Amino acid sequence: MNKQFLKAGMLGLLVAGWLSQAAMAQSDPTGKRRVTSTYAITNATVFKAPGDPGSRATILIKDGVILGVGNSLSLPKEAKIIAGDSLFVYPGFIDGAGTMGIAKPKDVERPKDFVSSNPADEIAGITPWRSASDSYTAASTQVDDWRKAGFTLSQIVPDGGMLPGKTALVLLGDGKTNNFLKLNTALAANYRSSRGMYPATLAGVMAKFRDIYQNTSLVLDHERLFASTAGVKRPQATPTQLAMMPVVQKQLPVLFSASSELEIRRALALQKELGFKLILTGLENYESVIGAIKASGTPVLIKLQVPDDKSIKAQKADGVTESTKAQYARVKESYDKALKQAAELEKAGILFGFSTADAKAGDVQKALKAMLDNGLSKKAAFAALTTNPAAILGVSGLVGTLEKGKLANLVLTTDTLFKEEAQIKHVIADGYVFDYEIKKKAVKAEATTAKPEPASNAVTVEGLWEYTSETPAGSSGGEITLKRENGVLGGSITYDDPTGSGKASAPIKNASINGKALSFEFDVAAGGMSLTVTISGEINGKSMEGSLSVPQMGSFPVKAKLSSPSQAN
Amino acid sequence: MKKHIYLLAAFLGLGVGMTHAQIQKGSVLIKNATVLTVTKGNLESSDVLVQNGVITQIGKNLTAPAGVTAIDATGKYVMPGIIDAHSHVGLDVVNEASAPITSEIRMKDVVNPTEIGIYRALAGGVTVSHAMHGSANVVGGQNATLKHRWGSMDPADIIMQDAPRTIKFALGENPTRVHGRGNGIQPRSRMGVEAVIRNGFNEAIQYKKAWEKYTLAKTQKGNTLTPPAYSERLQTLVDILDGKIIIHCHSYRADEIYMLINVIKDFNIKKVVFQHTNEGFKVAPEIAEYTMGASVFADWWAYKMEVYYSTAYNAAILQKNGAITSINSDSAELIRHLYHEAGKTQRYGGLTDEEALAMITINPAKQLGIEDKVGSIEVGKQADLVIFEGHPLSSYAVPQMTFVDGVKYFDRKADREDQRLWVAATEMVEPIFLRANEEAHRCMQDVDKYFEAFQGAFEKEKH
């Protein structure tokens, strides 16, 4: 049993006890406690599961459980009504494997007699006994971002080395309660080697994985002998072996991160050799390996993103040689293939869901649209967001569809799912309702002109900001210049040049200010690749705090200070 | 039967072919060439018939069976596919430099069939390469013998599955630098290298005994003996002692070569090939008597202290002393003109055409334990063949076509400008610059990366 989890649970009970007492004694002084945990979404268009054509119904939920879906439900007095007449209701999305809210555990200090050729497991990134729940923070902006995108449940994957620990299922409900639905759902594995010690390379990781697996199997033999025969020396399983036992006994799957075709093949080969239960996650390039995946019967979680189209957009029509054009064509071919991969999975009949790890919550719609435009059926996309991951994670009885008795995880949209106009208005996760602002389309906005913000709320955004950000590579920073031109917010940003020393500069794009919330993007080019970095944060007076998110790498805290307000203010 | 399936698939426009774990075997008739068999002399104006990947007939005026393509090779030369006994092409990792013995490492785990170096090697007539672990450790990883089936996406399809196991050993400056000077552990000297090997084998003998004892006890009633720990590292050393694995040992100096000969004599090991072996000429009779020979550079030395003393006559001296001798590349560049490297033994040592060609065909085949399958043009052997314009040992030789298992993987006339198997969807197409001083030799790849974590200063030489 996980101690942290126990502690959290105990704390939760204590707090709940105190709260209920307080409720009897006096009203909630913070005003934050919800009035009821019973909700009814009335007369909405409900899609209970992939393939359901949708029908008018009312959904009643209480304490995080769906009490009923139908047209003749009697609604209790305490039910808060959410008028669903213009809303479309879907089961909450499920993230098959993600890293939202996950912090990297601190590196273990090396002992004085450290031997790099045979380091302790813990130092070499082999910590299968750890649980993702120990390094999870519900109050993370990443969790907020993914919930806003419709996700209500995630299998969180711990950060670390080649065997960082066990995954856990977490509900994206109220951050103040214990949100773990299930601990130890899979053993996370990847090809991450250890710097400056064994295993230092991919080849070492493969060998080490076999070594751990085989020795765990032998310790199990030893334990059986010990249990059945007198006079046998006692077994002494290491923490690594203890944590590996359910994997060797085929009770717990290995969740192997494998993004490229070769990585996928290597994981499949290892599985074939050793025989463990396998789930592949983080698939990015898998077009040529779909046959092998199908043959192995392995369920997969593909990255919820599509390749950046920057290289496609950068292709020039004129002034390039024939050979450059031929190279363009090959990149385009790869790009087109990448977009079609999800549809190919569907065609092959492979059970697949999505992984949010390394993806951006803000780009989900774009990614799904690209997959749908390239042959993926709406039904399959719906299933990949709901019933498929529920099946892969072994929780089909609890989540994935809208049925009586299932957890109250719902997504309420303004139009049918995957329609471009559709926006998420509410997400209900673990029975907690989260409301989101619906953006009016620019054309229609004239009729309902938004009220100008009260002067006291107006924030100064234009000017020169000095920022710092903390990334695994260390602290870095630069200057952000923001300016409004013809009412459009723009400017530039400087950052540490990744290709050398000094600073590089990039124009700011897609900048927006909404109340105090500022967000913008810029492109960083390095080594023939181009990345779009997003900075979003909240402005308070002359300072801004938020996050900097980089595709493939994750989100990092960023802080900025307004150093010289422009004349306009 | 399979051919029919392929034909049907092609007709239906299905993307069968090489992506589906099915190794292709081809049929072809090469007509009217000078056939350099290497083992059975040269045959003027002769034909070679290949059926389903195997050489089935060699002779004059052969006719192509129905459905078999005939290639007119009048005025051209056909030789066996070139075999490189020392290469790192097609590997994603070369050195697991973190321990003096890493025999549990398998290069087969890190084969990358899409590496362009494989195609470039084909363009130089090389059909088989020995993808080796690097020389950072005294006992490195287990190597992979590759067949250059370009176009395969599955590593398993380019690994020569019927080749015996081989392993990398390394003596001298590299392991002492990495582990001794770099990390403060044994070996710090050549004596330490010997100690690491002897200790390793002795430990392996204990490991084998422990497992034999347990395996026997396990079957008995009331057994209380528990299983020993599993170690693929020691098990691999056991397999070497049992003659199941061929050692390929990186070496330069005569003293260290002689040291390893003494070690293998003590442990009754027969299967050893020396690699580089620049001072091999000093101990050529010993190499000939006790080992499977030496695989050497044609004329390359003086890139670090331990390899200052050498000669371009090295290969010829070894050969004349009866040692099986091959010429290797250890380089993604040299691998493209090994036929030219072999020709140097004629300038330095006066070897015959057949002896020189044997250095890159049947001799390396013997050292890899695959001489019954490849390395010469003989009926019953796998059809790895190269068609040359000009005699392959001529300075003007140009490979025209390269076949592996009778399938044509390189054709100079159908050589597309872009032969890459995989292109990233996000690749920014930028002008191409040719770089000089490119790091071509990868014997010590991944070692720098390994060391930069705790040590900055590292010497430049890599071999």
Image: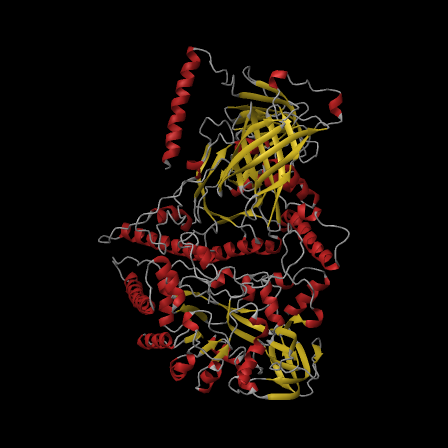
Question: Is residue A427 visible to the viewer in this orientation of the structure?
Answer: no
Which quarter of the picture shows residue B21?
bottom right
Which quadrant is home to the N terminus of chain B?
Answer: bottom right
Which is more toward the observer, A70 or B213? B213
Q: Is residue B118 left or right of residue A237?
A: right
User: Residue A529: where, in percent of width, then height?
Assistant: 61, 49
Query: Can residue A221 be seen in the rendering of this structure?
Result: yes
Q: Position of residue A496 (x, y in %)?
A: 55, 42
- Which residue is located at x 54 percent, y 53 percent? A264
Front residue of this view, candidates A332 and A211: A332
Q: Residue B61 at x, y = what percent?
A: 69, 87
Q: Which quadrant holds residue B220?
A: bottom left
Q: Residue furthest left?
A: A231
- Colour mapping used in the image: secondary structure
- Please give the name of the residue rendered at 69% of the width and 59% of the height, measured from the top-left corner: B14
Looking at the picture, how far across and down is residue B3, in whole percent? 66, 69
Relative to B337, residue B460 above or below: above
User: Does residue B149 appear left or right of residue A322 in this picture?
Assistant: left
- Where A392 sits versus B58, above or below? above
What residue is rendered at 56% in x and 22% in y?
Answer: A541
**Residue closest to the eye, A332 or B337:** B337
